[in-house]
Amino acid sequence: MRTIGMGLVGPGFVAAHHIDAVRRLGDVEVIAVAGSSQQSAERKAREYKVDRAYGNFADLIADPDIGVVHNTTPNHLHFAVSMAAFKAGKHVVSDKPLALNSTEGRQLRDAAVKAGVAHAVTFNYRGNPLVQHARAMVASGESGEVSFVHGHYLQDWMADPNVYSWRSDPAKGGSSSALGDIGSHWCDLAEHVSGLQIDSVLADLTTVIPVRFSVGASAEAFSSGSKGERTEVRVSAEDLASVLLRFKNGALGCFSVGQVLHGHQVAAGVSKRSLDRPSSPGERSAGQGPEPHSSPGAGVCSPARWPSGVVGRCIFQCHTRRLSLDS
C-alpha cells in the first residue's frame, strides 16, 4: 500500500485534530510540523510524536518526503503557505478560509489547477454519517423540493472580554469574525445538505463586546485567556450576526451565529427526524452528540476528543414539501 507523506504548518489548537484524523486513515504518515520558530516547532513535534520539526514553512514544503501540506496557520498566512505548496507541486488541505478575500482565493484555485494538485478545505461537518444521509434523501427526491433552511451556530468562548486572539484582529483574521469563523460552517452545511447554492444575503452584524483586553500575545482558540498585564484593544469584527438567505431555486433561509452567548458549550451531534414519525431509539437529538460508545467517525465533534466547553451548538433544519431534516 502506498503511504502518503503529510506535513503540517501551524501546530496550534486544531493541528492535533488534523494529525489524529490522518493517523486513523492508515495510509498517511505524519512526516513533519512547521511552526513560527524552530523552538516552538520542536516542542510541538515532541507533543504530537512527529520526528521532524521546521522553523519555517518553506523548509517543510521542500522536504521531498512530504506530498500533502495541511495548512492550519492563522488566516492571514493561508495564502502564502498554500501558494508555496502549489508551486512545489504539493497537495494542500487548508482550514477555512482559503484566503482573506476572493481575489486571493481565485489565485489559489488557478495555481492548484495549473499544478494539477488537490486543494481541499476542512468543512468537517460534511463527514457526519447522518448529514450524509440527509443529503442523500434530498438528492434522491425522497424528501421533496427544499423550500426553507434555517438554524444557528452559537458559542460562548469569547463572552469574556479578557479573551483576545488573532481572530479579533482584521489584519490576521480578516474583516469578519463570527460569520467567517463559524457562519461559514453553517452555510456550507446548508448548501451541502440541500444541494442548493446561496444566491443573495441580507445580514445584520453586531459587535457585542467592542473592547477587549490583550496581554500582548494571541490566546489559543477556545482558551479562557492568558495571564499578565492587559492592554485595551478596540474590536470592529462582528461577534454576533443574523442573516437572511435566498437560494438560487427561490428557497428562503435564515440563520444566526454568535461567539459571545453564554451557555452554548455543547458539542454538536446530528439527528434526522421526519415531521410525521417519532424518532427511533437510536437517534440522538441535536446538540447531544454521538452515543457514548459510538465509533470515532460517528460524531462531528465528540466531547471525548474536544476540550470541554469549546465547540458550541450548530443547529440546522431543512424544510421540504414532505418532511423536516434536522441536525
Image (cartoon, rainbow, N blue to C red):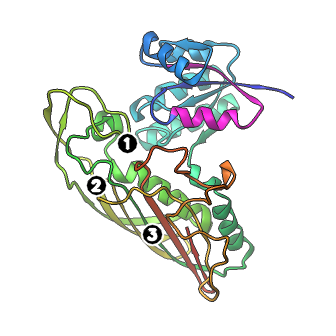
The answer to whether marks 2 and 3 mark residues whose Cβ atoms lie closer than 8 Å is: no
**Residue 276: quarter of image:** bottom right
Residue at 49 percent of width and 59 percent of height: 187
Q: Earlier in the sequence, mark 1 or mark 2?
A: 1
Residue beneath disc 1: 222
Q: Earlier in the sequence, mark 2 or mark 3?
A: 3
Residue, far bottom: 276
**Quadrant the C terminus occupies:** bottom right
Return the x and y of residue 90 as percentages of the image width and height.
66, 25
- What's the CA distance linking mark 1 and mark 2? 12 Å
Is any atom of residue 309 visible in this view?
yes
Q: Amino acid at mark 3?
A: Gly
**Lateral position of residue 177 relative to residue 187, left or right:** left
**Which range of residues does the magenta coloring cover?**
15-34
- What's the CA distance linking mark 1 and mark 3? 22 Å
Q: Amino acid at mark 1?
A: Phe
Query: Which mark is on residue 151?
Result: 3
Q: Amino acid at mark 2?
A: Val
Residue 22 counted in the magenta span: yes
Residue, far right: 1
The answer to whether marks 1 and 2 mark residues whose Cβ atoms lie closer than 8 Å is: no
Of the pair 313 and 240, the residue shown nearer to us:
313
Residue beneath disc 2: 260
Rendered view: 291 above or below 59: below
Return the x and y of residue 184 as percentages of the image width and height.
46, 53
Helix, strand or loop status at disc 3: strand
Residue at 44 percent of width and 60 percent of height: 313
Helix, strand or loop status at disc 1: loop
Q: Nearer the viewer, mark 2 or mark 3?
A: 2
